[in-house]
Amino acid sequence: MAGFDQRDFRSALGRFATGVTIITARGGDGRAVGVTANSFNSVSLDPPLVLWSLDRKSGSLDAFESADEFAIHVLGLDQEHLSNRFASRGADKFEGLAIGDTGVPLLEGSAARFHCRKVQRHDVGDHILYIGEVIAFHASDDAPLLYLQGRYGEARRREVAELSYDLEAARLGKGAILNLLSDAYVRIIARFHAEFGALGLSQSAPVVLIALSEGVIALDEITRAVEARAYRFSAEEQQAMVRQGLIAIADGRVTLLPEGKTAYARMLAAMKRVEDHLIGGLTAGEVAEARHFLAKLGNLAED
Ligand SMILES: Cc1cc2nc3c(=O)[nH]c(=O)nc-3n(C[C@H](O)[C@H](O)[C@H](O)COP(=O)(O)O)c2cc1C
């Protein structure tokens, strides 16, 4: 025995999620047998081969050893009771199930069924490994029963994966104007924010200062201007600007203080630095075209 705890080993194996099958056969004496097994797996497509392993201690061992064929039933979500029945010893596992008197017992209503000819058997540790060649199969749309960490479960597709797939499908081409514009905007605005941050200004402060410089003084109007640019002018942000001595707020009105005027001038200088940087990479003709083009696009969006 390897130097590790068998319970830990089983528990680690249980982290591998599987489906659940019932595997049936008819022994040489004509007795129908069936066991619940999750050791089922596919092996080969051509030829079509599958495998599973049976505990040597199984009461069905003799029948499986003498049988030439077996049937693997992949259980559906509503067949948990059958899984439990075929995982227990003693009781008449086939009671109430129509399986006929001869041939491999075939159960109705499984998610999939593989009728196999036994082509190989191997003694492997405390189990016997059977390899079957599939001679007939059928599959239904029924949701399969799962087994994980000693408990039954059901399959659920990951929402995130599906969502990202949908987004990918809905995605505009890389050359779409919308994508190019938003990409340029995000990168340019990141440059602005780096400059503003160095001035100790929050993301909403520039919008507030610009609105004040344009003569807007009502707090709710300024707040709307900030929100239109997808920022927030929360009570904390308002207080931060007040503490910085940039503005005063009283009776729903905002006043630009001398310190605020200085910040506004610095902010304009920072904006000019970014603008100069961008323009520096364009020819005079491109700058004129860009201005014309962006203004036109804005107007078209409003039509
Ligand atoms: C989800 C699940 C999967 C199982 N997988 C196997 C398996 O792959 N091989 C096996 O021999 N027993 C497996 N068992 C245990 C057998 O179903 C159980 O020992 C059963 O009593 C055997 O029946 P028998 O002794 O009448 O042959 C599994 C049990 C459960 C609940």
Image (cartoon, grey):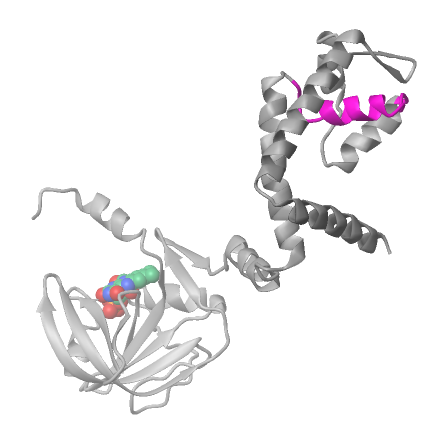
The percent position of residue 118, horizontal first and vertical second, equals 19, 83
Seen from this angle, which residue lies furthest left? 1
Q: Give percent across and percent down for residue 86.
A: 34, 68
Taking the spot 77% from the left edge, 53% from the top edge, the residue there is 297
Q: What residue do we see at 68% from left, 17% from top?
A: 266
Say if the magenta span includes residue 18. Answer: no
Segment colored magenta: 201-218
Q: Residue at x 67, y 54 (%)?
A: 178
Location of residue 232 with respect to 259 vertically, above or below: below
Taking the image in four quarters, ligand 1 sits in the one at bottom left
Q: Is residue 263 above or below residue 151?
A: above
Q: Horizontal placement of 56 versus 294: left or right?
A: left
Q: Is residue 31 visible?
A: no
At which x and y percent is residue 199?
Answer: 62, 17
Q: Quadrant of residue 94?
A: bottom left
Residue 37 rendering spot, x and y as whole percentages: 29, 67
Mark yes or no: residue 101 visible: yes
Q: Residue furthest front?
A: 284
Is residue 206 inside the magenta stretch? yes
Q: Does residue 238 lie above or below 94 as drawn?
A: above
Specify whether 217 is left or right of 246.
Answer: right
Image quarter hosting the C terminus: bottom right
64 or 137, nearer to the observer: 137
Query: Horizontally, is 25 left or right of 112 in the view?
Result: left
x 74%, y 18%: residue: 264
Instruction: Report the number of numbered marks.
Output: 0
Position above or below: 281 against 137: above
Query: Which quarter of the figure has residue 24?
Result: bottom left
